[in-house]
Amino acid sequence: MKNLLHIFNYIQKYHDDNLDILYLTLEFLLIARNANVSNALIVQKHKTRALEDFKGFLESLELEVVEFHPSLNYKKILKSLQNLTIKTHSLAEFIQIITMQKTILKLYEYATPIEINTLVCAILEIKNGESVYNPCCGLGSWLLHLNTYSKDCVFYGLDINPKLIRIAKALALLLEFKFCTLNVGNVFSETFVPTEKYDKVFCYPPLLQHLNIKAPKESQLAPYNKTALEVPFIDYSLMRFEKKAVFIARTALLSKGAGERLCKHLLDSNLLECVIELPDNISPYKAESYSLLVISNTNQRCLLIDARNFYLKEGKYNKLINLENILDLYFSKQATQYSYLLDYAKIKETNIRPSAYSHHSNAQISLETLLECAYRGSRIASKNDSGLISCYDFGIKDFNPYGFSDSFCDSTLKANSAQLNLLKIKPFDVLFSMRGVIPKIAIIGKEAEDKIVLPNAGILVLRFKDSKIAKAMYFYFSSKDGQEILKKFYLNHNERVGEKEIKVLQIPSSCLESKFLEQCNTNFIQLCKHGENIAKHTKNVKTLLGF
């Protein structure tokens, strides 16, 4: 991924159009993947002939040719890409960075955040052989995630911008999609499609003013409201889907006003399966709040998921988190503090926003929703053989009361086995003692990264999904409020808690809110500084007393 960014930045020196620069980057990737063509271009001494070979190869792939600047050192680029395997996730991260993070490039209008693409692909449950339609496909960022779920689907993408379609075609070739049709066209007047309906549809409508689109005769949403900018795109897409569709729409459209006719139609037609209200500020320069509309046939109830607090702040924008939890709620159709499964009769036609049906003041979540895993320490017997390796035993006596625990003194030899890697603790793991009225708590520092540190029996290891969450939870459980929750919980379990019990520990849902996490991380830094001072003073006192 760093290599791709370096190449992109290098091409920027010779080209002004960022869409051309991205396309050229992908062109070089395609050439580098063909060793014969790549080597031939590298050894070619005549630049004019090299440009002709470059053009000929791309034309053989049925790609539009964007010639690179004569002063650009194409051999340098190809040599840097030789023997380099670019995996799908690296390509996805590269697209995410240049579209969502490097906002100066102004490419954010043409792509969707990674987390949204991942969520949509999982919800649609695309199977091999199914037809998939993606109007307004932009530069094809969804292909990077669709590739993970079903590369053998029959994909149709459409966008009005030819520069975006050629980028999407290059991505499709890099991802080796078998059945992929990408065309330049107008969503409202397309004539190229071989079928009228598709199994699955995903549409992220652009917010375009003054379209003056006339609704077709069969439309249930006519006439279009000029302030409901997504409705024409949603209406035309609704006529195309067969099994399931997902739309991204402004949340404001789901309450009384411009989107009222849309809400009523979806309910009257039994099309609305689920609404997922997303966090604010997850896309650059989009002040509006957004939601996902999941559409399918013959529904009698609708699942409303309020995911507004499922985010972490990254720079100026927010990142959607807890995707697995959202998907668990969606597929299980369970009612929780964040989800509400309601009969259509209980849903107001003037408001289908999940937050309108939520009551979060006393909401709680289980600790498991924040965890990657939880396990207990155990004894590993040493053996007198040649396979012994150096490890460290870590007990409750090694817990630093304030801040990171990163001192590991009890070196021992253990038999080399897979169990060591399964049990060893990692940086940012949070440790609890299993017994006691109020457990002792520790958080592991980065010193454990290159060591095999094994927790003693009687210690619970909690591995959180994110280091920010880990530091916030360590601080919270060390605080007065957290200690009170732990005290009640341990007393209710006879002062002994294992990994199964700790997962169901209920904590306030506010612990997932970005402001809470940021404040706890700030407080954690202060706690570490105070802890270091306390440790120094304690050492000086012991020295003074002769210990």
Image (tube, rainbow, N blue to C red):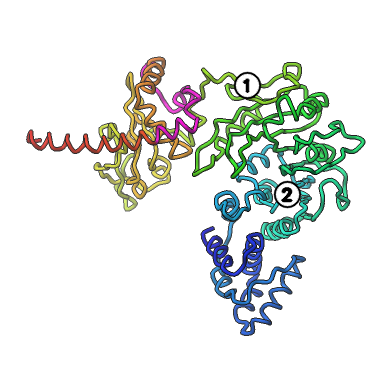
Mark nearer the N terminus (1 vs 2): 2
Residue that numbered label 1 is attached to: 335
**243 to 33, vertically: above or below:** above
Dividing the image into 4 quarters, which one contains the C terminus?
top left
| Amino acid bearing label 1 | Ala
The dominant secondary structure in magenta is helix
Within 10 Å of the Cα at label 2, are there few (<14), some (14-19), or many (20+) other Cα atoms?
many
Residue toward you, 453 or 399: 399
* Residue 417 placement (x, y as % from top left): 40, 46
Within 10 Å of the Cα at label 1, are there few (<14), some (14-19), or many (20+) other Cα atoms?
some
Q: CA distance from mark 1 to mark 2?
A: 33 Å
From the viewer's perspective, is 402 left or right of 45? left
**67 to 474, vertically: above or below:** below
| Amino acid bearing label 2 | Cys
Identify the residue at image location x=92%, y=36%: 217
Residue toward you, 20 or 432: 20
* Residue 299 placement (x, y as % from top left): 78, 25
Identify the residue at image location x=72%, y=44%: 206
Magenta part of the chain: 494-521
Residue toward you, 126 or 78: 78
Residue that numbered label 2 is attached to: 137
Circle 2: element type: loop
